[in-house]
Every structure is written in structure tokens, then in C-alpha cells.
Amino acid sequence: MGKTLVVGLILAILAVAANAGQVVDGVLMVNGKPFYPLGSWNSDYTTPEDIARLGMNTSFRGGPSTPEAVETFRELMRECDQRGIQVVPYLSYGGAGVQPWAPEAVRAIAKLATEPNLLAWYVGDDIGMQHLPGIRQTVDILRENTPTIPTVADYIAKETPEAKTVFTQYIDIRCQYAYPIPDETFAQYLEFFDRQREFVGDPLWTWVQSFMWGRTGRALNVGAEGPGPVPDPEQVRLLAFAAINRGVRGLLFFPHHELHRLPELAAEVALTCREIRLFESHLAAGTTTFNLPTSLPEVNATAFQYGNSTVISAAVFKPSYHRWVDADVLKDVSIDCPWADAELPQAVLTATPDMVPCSVSIAPNPEQIRVTLPSLEIAGFVLITNDNFELTRVRRMAMRIPKDLRTLIMPAAAAQHRKVSSVVWQLGRDNLYSTSDMMDAVRAQDACAAALDRRDYDAAVRAWRALLRADRKMLDDVMRYAEAHQDMLSPSQQAYLASPYGLQNIPGLGDAPPADDPRRFIREYLVAGPFALDWDGKTPETPPGFARAYPPESQTRDDAEFETLDGKGKWKNAEADLSGLLRLLPLFKTTENVVCYAQCRVQAPREMDTKLSLGSNDGAAVFVNGKTVFSWSSAPEGGRSAHPHQNEIPVHLQAGMNIVVVKVENLGRDWQLYLAIHDPKQELKLELE
């Protein structure tokens, strides 16, 4: 090989390598331009097409550790390069406690530096104190072989001086993350990034956690495969904007294969990524001004000044939004933003599929302008500029977004609506005959499908967003209803308020009475039985077993024992659900042509007259302090279904403890009891203790 050819090859290799990622003055650069990575954690079966489909520009995946694997990985990188996708190989070291890569393996992977789309080396995941020596070893080898390629790692150990030294001297880009959903507010999420920046400085990336961890989903009893079907799409968008509003310079969504399984999240990620890429240089390299003055306290805004223009990232962070997002679209939101030019600029809000003009005026601070957004839904970017060419460029790029989303939005609309309607239906807050927001969502879904059919992608996106608003309205109604009944919930039940998707674990919530209902349902019982009803199914007379006084009518002590149809038995604890319904069928083996007894205790502060309210399947008799106050067998009428407040019964309570015993017959099938007491001032104590 001639000398000229060798020199030419070396120069070509150096030229290609020069196009790879570099950190220049704290800014990640690719091809001489600021670069904002948008990617995901990829499995081997995630293709470059999958990544591009979601509007991402970066692939993060496990790197090769053998010479043969390096060449296979190189082929993947070249496929990514054809789609404009940068690659971050992951040298798997960290959280699992494994040893760092052997030096020869690090040198082997370093050969990928000749690929033009090598963005950075990810050298550690969930790094703790024990991993710091390995980080130094790995980075020393990489810097010896690929001195210009940035290193990235994330850190979860204590904020020690040693950790700070390693992460500031050996790691060029820190990737810090937290899991705010469903436990922390977005305000706390913003504070997390402030603390991380104070600890390790800039630039920061973050992982956007696009699902609940499996243990949380299991705790809420949601999701058949571990992670629950949460968060909602809007929460994922807010997670991204929270990071952006704290100057985080790169977003990695985790993980890609979960986004495939959750199309409602995939579409929102695809939209958010594409809107971010409209303003990539501003978000990657712009001078930031945090916490801009806004007209509403829940609106957080950050300015990114780059070149001759500014981009505002604005997001709505209500205290409840880490749990559920309401349907509100804020109107006439004003934001004060730094602006040095004497001439007032133009301002447009990106609200795909629309670019919405915003009014601009002089702010009270002479170095600022006031930008007023006609409306703000969840989050969005505002471009402020006097450059008509830039406005035209952004508008043209934005016009392509709806078409890019065409294969994503219909699966997203269907999946989200199915999730939300399941919540509403399971709680009994909607039925086939009720009028509700459900029909608004259904019509929006139909409109989305029709628009896609006629290839009107702008209309399809608008219909998709309308469906999400209707779904948010339903979730908001459900959560506000649930919180209004919070005082009625046990501590274990209150844990399910963490998400709308946990509410199905609170029996009777959908039919719970208003919190100010003067009739208080008995929730705690002792039950005993079953005993024979001896109903022959024919005689139109009260069954003998209903008239017969079985021992529980007089033996109300907790330790009393009885001979029952199921054998020896005692009083045992039972609990009615939030609607006041006590289901008796699950409590006994023999459940047809029987009676049982349900005992409760009412402690009165003084002697008083009040009313009991009874509902039963089938008939019932009520005894207060051993005296019969109500008796009716439904056998002559063939039984009845139970509903609250079917019978009102005047009763006299003595001062102190009162023993109430209800005898409930069951001819067959359902066996249920409702019992409430009129107590508008909540003077009575209804617990068993």
C-alpha cells in the first residue's frame, strides 16, 4: 500500500471520528452543531426503525465486549447512521455489582470510535461507592484510545467528596434520575435536578421513567405483567418538560420495549420528541433563565436564549399532577422573558398541529418582554424571534409532525380510552344508560379514525387530543370523588389513592354515600351462622327457622360458641364495603335456605331516639339490646334484592354501649345486608372495640 493511500486513509478515519460526539465548553456537539439526545434503552430486538418511529435521534444499548461482537455492533451503528441516529454503547457496569470490563474488552469496543455516529460511552449504571475505582480504570483506557468521545454515567450513592471527584473529572456528562410518579410532586422533581446540578454540575441528562416500577404496580394491583398501566401520557410529557425546565440537556426514555407495549405512551413520547427537535439548538446549548415570572403559580417556565432568538419551555405542574392530570386548558397565560433587542419580537406557541400566535408587550421589568399565550395545555414551547426565516423553518418542520404520527395516534387513542373507561366502569361511575363524558371520548375516537381514513392528519391529531381531554375529565371526576370519601377509607385503602388505576381495589367506592350523609353505614360486624331456615319453598308463611330464636340472639359475647350448619362456630369479624354493603355469601359454606346473624355495637354519648336504616337480601329481623325492633320475612313474597334504606326503624339507644343484632335470611342466590344509623352530628361510635 502506497504512503499517499495510507495517509489518505488515516485522514479519512480522523475526519469520520471528528463527526462523532464531543463536549465543547459544556455543550454536546455533533457535526459542529449542538445536539440534544432523545433516545431510549434498547433491547437487541429494537430496530433503528423502531427508534426513528418515535422521533428519537439516539440509540442506547448494551455494547459489545469481543472483537466479533464489535463488528456486529458496527453494522447496527451504520444502520442507525442511515436514519440519522446517534449511538451510545453501554459498558454494563454498576447496579448489578459486576466487575468493570476487562481492559482488553474496553480496547476492543474503543475501535467503534471510527464510526461517525458514536455519540458517547455510557460507562456506568446505578454507580455506587464500590464502583468508583472501576470507573476510573475504564475511563482511563477510553481516553487513551478515544480522547474526544464523551463519557456518561449515572450515580445513586451518597454525595461524597470522592464521588464528586470521580463524576466531575472522569465523567463528562452526568445522567441523574428519579422516580417521581406516583410518590413525589413535580415541584419536588424540579428540586431533584437542582440538587444534582449543585453536586456534579452540567451538563446533565436524565432517564424519563415511562412506567411505574413493577412493585408499585403490584401494590396497586394494576397490570398483569408487572408494571402497571401508568403513568398517563400527559404525565410522561410533564416528566420530560420538568427535566427541560431545569436545563437537562438530554432525555433517555426507559425502556423502549415498554413503549411498544403501551401505545398510549409511545405516541405521546413521539410527539414530545418531535417538538423538542424543533428547538434542538436552544435546548442543547441555550443560555438558561429559570423560573420566569408567570401569571399563574402552577405554570413553570424556562427561557433558552440561542443566537438571535429565545425559546420558552412552559409547563403546568399542579400539586396533584404526579397522581392524575385534569382536563383544564389554561387561558391567557402571561410569561415575562428576558429580551435584549429594542424591537418587540414575534412569538408563536407550538401546539401540534397548530402554531399559535402569542401577543408580546413590554414587561414591567425593562429588560423583559411579556408573552401572553392564548391557551396552554399541559406543556409547550414558545419561539420568540424577529427572524422570519427561522419562523418559517419551524413552521415547516412542525407541519410534518401530524403525518409522522399517523400510525401511532389511533392505537394510542384506543389504549388510553380503554384504560380510563375501565376505571370509570369498575367504580360504577358510568353505565349503559348514563350520560357522561364517556360519549365525548367515544366521539373523539371516532373522529380520529375518520380523519385518518381521509388522510387529514391535522384533524386526526386534534381529535386525539380531544379524546385525551375527555379521558382526563373522567379521571379528574373519579379522583375528586374518591378524595371526597378519603375520611371513610382505612389506612390500607388510602394507599390506593396514589393513582386512579388503584381505585378498583376499594370495594364499594363507586356507590359510597356522600361524606355529609346523615345516615352512617355500619362497616364493622361480628357474624355467626349459618342456621336452618327450614323454608319449603311453597308455604306462604314465615319459615320456622326465621321465627326460631337461635343462640346468637342472646349470646353476643365475642367468645360465644354455637352449633351451626357448618359445624362448631363463633362470632367472626366481617366488614362492609364503602357503600355499606356486607356480602354474606363468602362468609359461610352453606348459603341456601339459611339464616345468619350480624352483630354491631353502637356507643351513644347519652340516651337518645334515632332511626336504623335497613336493606337486606332476603328478609331480616333486628334486635337492639335484646329487644325485637323489626321483623319481616320475605319468604312469602319469594325474596327481595338488597338496596340501602329499604326499611326505616325507630330505635331507642341507652347511654353507653348498645348491642344491635340483625338476623338475615337467605332463600337462595345473593345474601346481603345494609345497615345504617341516623347520626347527622356523628356523635355515635360505631366500631366494635
Image (spheres, rainbow, N blue to C red):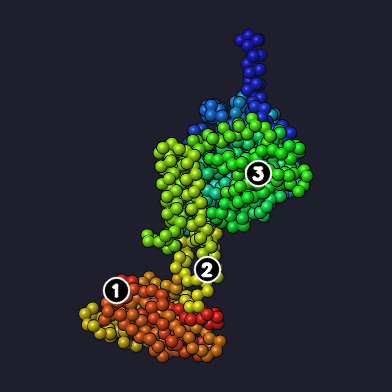
Q: Distance between the residues labelled 3 and 2?
A: 43 Å
Residue furthest to the right in view is: 366
In this rendering, does residue 166 appear at all? no
- Mark with earlier residue (3, 2): 3
- Percent from the top left, x then y, of residue 607? 52, 90
Residue 498 higher or lower than 404, as above or below:
below
The residue nearer to you, when weighing 593 against 561, is 593
Q: Which quarter of the picture shows residue 613?
A: bottom left
Nearer to us of marks 3 and 1 is: 3
Q: Mark 3 or mark 1, which has the lower sequence index?
A: 3
Residue on which the image places disc 3: 359
Please give left or right for residue 128 compared with residue 673 in the image. Answer: right
**Residue under pointer 2:** 485
Q: How far apart are marks 3 and 1 (CA)?
A: 70 Å
Residue positioned 64% across, 14% down in the render: 8
Please identify, in this view, whether the residue under mark 3 or under mark 2 is nearer the observer: 3
Q: Which residue is pictured at 61% across the width and 32% down the height?
A: 392
Mark nearest the camera among 2 and 1 is 2
Which residue is the site of mark 1?
A: 668
Question: Which amino acid is tagged 2?
Answer: His
Give the residue type at disc 1: Gly
Find residue 286 and report its horizontal and vertical position in percent.
70, 37
